Image: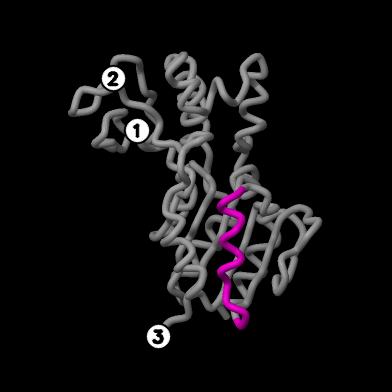
């Protein structure tokens, strides 16, 4: 039986592909608060504004390319059973070749209806327009978890972490909850590695490798593959 690896990835990983974090992206829209751009209340008040913001983010994400760290993570599937649990809303893990990816904060490359059925459609890099409806006749919105909405796949993610022989955290300082709490589920005997630019409080049992993921991860992963 192949060993199991869980990757927990955050916005720092995508930043190395040139994508701004949410707060950086929102900063370009600084005349608006995050409540305006990424909340159910903001959507109800001005859906056209929200769509414009996410259409811009989606277009940038679709033009971006997977970086060396994304590719190294995907290469792990040659030897291990790999699950990626990501806070990132882009598709860079999948485009790098990772086959099992849980997006706890949703996906830019999908739209969904706003009715009870929450009908979901893959749109890749295309925009969503006002008046664009799902099959049940409700306005399409980004398939993103907004502030005040429930994070997705947390139970499944926790089970994967608890069963993993290796847990690799990359591109996050573990400050965004509830996703950050997933590290608490890691087994005591699992190999636990954390990589980000800087970290004030490394979780117990994790080995911290500071530096850019594009430089650090290929070296770590090469060691696991040999």
CB under 8 Å between callouts 1 and 2?
yes
* Callout 2: SS: loop
Residue 1: mark: 3
CA gap, disc 2 and disc 3: 47 Å
Is 32 in front, or is 20? 32
Is 72 in front, or is 117? 117
Residue 132: mark: 2
Residue 66: mark: none
Residue under the image location 67 percent in, 54 percent down:
174
* Callout 3: SS: loop
The first of marks 1 and 3 along the sequence is 3
Residue density around tag 1, few if under 14, some if 14–19, many if 20 or more, within 10 Å:
many
Confirm whether the magenta stretch covers residue 156.
no
Confirm whether the magenta stretch covers residue 183.
yes
The first of marks 2 and 3 along the sequence is 3
Residue under the image location 46 percent in, 14 percent down:
46
Report the mark closest to the observer, 1 or 3: 1
Residue density around tag 2, few if under 14, some if 14–19, many if 20 or more, within 10 Å:
few
Q: Where is residue 226 shown, x and y percent of the image?
A: 57, 81
CA gap, disc 1 and disc 2: 10 Å
Q: Where is residue 225 shown, x and y percent of the image?
A: 55, 77
Q: Residue furthest bottom?
A: 1
The first of marks 1 and 2 along the sequence is 1
Residue under the image location 20 percent in, 23 percent down:
137
Residue under circle 1?
Answer: 111
Q: Which residues are magenta?
A: 177-189
Q: Residue furthest left?
A: 135
In the rendered image, the vertical position of residue 36 relative to residue 185, given as above or below: above
Residue under the image location 46 percent in, 75 percent down:
80
Is 53 in front, or is 216? 53
* Callout 1: SS: strand
């Amino acid at each position: 039986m192949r060993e199991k690896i869980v990757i927990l990835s955050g916005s720092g990983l995508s930043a190395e592909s040139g994508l701004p974090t949410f707060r950086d992206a929102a900063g370009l829209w600084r005349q608006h608060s995050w409540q305006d751009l990424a909340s159910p209340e903001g959507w109800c008040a001005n859906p056209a504004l929200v769509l414009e913001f996410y259409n811009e983010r989606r277009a940038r994400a679709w033009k971006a390319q997977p970086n060396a760290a994304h590719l190294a993570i995907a290469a792990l599937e040659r030897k291990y059973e790999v699950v990626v649990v990501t806070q990132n809303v882009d598709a860079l893990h999948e485009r790098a070749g990772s086959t099992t990816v849980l997006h706890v904060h949703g996906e830019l490359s999908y739209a969904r209806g706003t009715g009870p059925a929450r009908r979901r459609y893959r749109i890749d890099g295309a925009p969503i327009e006002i008046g664009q409806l799902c099959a049940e006749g409700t306005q399409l919105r980004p398939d993103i978890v907004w502030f005040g909405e429930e994070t997705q796949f947390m139970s499944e993610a926790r089970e994967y972490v608890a069963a993993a022989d290796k847990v690799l955290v990359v591109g996050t300082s573990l400050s965004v909850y509830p996703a950050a709490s997933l590290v608490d589920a890691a087994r005591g005997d699992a190999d636990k590695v954390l990589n980000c630019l800087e970290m004030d409080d490394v979780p117990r049992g994790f080995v911290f490798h500071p530096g850019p993921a594009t430089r650090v991860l290929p070296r770590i992963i090469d060691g696991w593959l040999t």
